[in-house]
Amino acid sequence: MKILLHICCAPCATAVVENLRTDGYDITGYFYNPSIHPWKEFKRRMDTLKEWAPTIDLPVIYSEEYPLEDNIRMLLGSANRCFSCFSDRMNTTAKLALEMGIEQFTTTLTVSPYQNQNLLIKAGEAASDIHGVQYLYRDYRNSYRRSIELSRGLHMYRQPYCGCVFSERDRYLKIKSPGQV
Ligand code: SF4
């Protein structure tokens, strides 16, 4: 079974790839995360994935564009910026899956106990309806510790905030983002 896996970062991907492969999935990864700020952080997360993915024979497609103005406009124009951010990532992944003839898609965001899983499901299912590709929802939060173990063992870079400039600020002010629990 083929699946297109949206990858938010390499540390989260470690445990999700392990789970999906155990379940027999043939995975293609997709790094698409235009909300990550600043560009150096975006590059660092992408480069961490680029170093690790070949070591486990994981093919990954990288979206290297950095449409900062469009992204900030999208986040500011939304009633819930995290829902827009999830929806953008799920829609773009579902669209690519359709173009590639892959029947299912999912995301590594499902391993994070900090992300609002209901919002993720809503975004994934809406993208599935639009593009006609099945959204595979698996709650991988019970593998979060495993992802920490694996990524620390590999000396991977582990980021200290979700991604956008707002979350970079909020970590210091101890404010929860609207898509976090
Ligand atoms: S906090 Fe995370 S999910 Fe929410 S908008 Fe920022 S990057 Fe996206």
Image: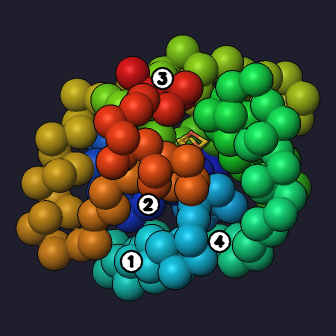
What residue did someone put label 4 on?
61
Q: Is residue 171 above or below residue 63?
A: above
Q: Position of residue 164 (x, y in %)?
A: 57, 53
> Which mark is on residue 48?
1
Q: Position of residue 78 (x, y in %)?
A: 79, 31
N-terminal-most mark, 2 or 3? 2
Assign a secondary structure to mark 1. Answer: helix
- Pointers 4 and 2 in contact (C-beta within 8 Å): no
Q: Residues within 10 Å of mark 4 (few under 14, many from 20)?
A: some
Assign a secondary structure to mark 2. Answer: loop
N-terminal-most mark, 2 or 1? 2
Report the amino acid beneath label 1: Thr
What residue did someone put label 3 on?
116
The label nearer to you, 4 versus 2, is: 2
Quarter of the picture holding the C terminus: top left
Estimate the spatial distance between the alpha carbons at disc 2 and disc 3, rounded to whole Å. 17 Å
- Pointers 1 and 4 in contact (C-beta within 8 Å): no
Estimate the spatial distance between the alpha carbons at disc 3 and disc 4, rounded to whole Å. 26 Å
Q: Residues within 10 Å of mark 1 (few under 14, many from 20)?
A: some
Estimate the spatial distance between the alpha carbons at disc 2 and disc 1, rounded to whole Å. 8 Å
The label nearer to you, 3 versus 4, is: 3
What residue did someone put label 2 on?
9
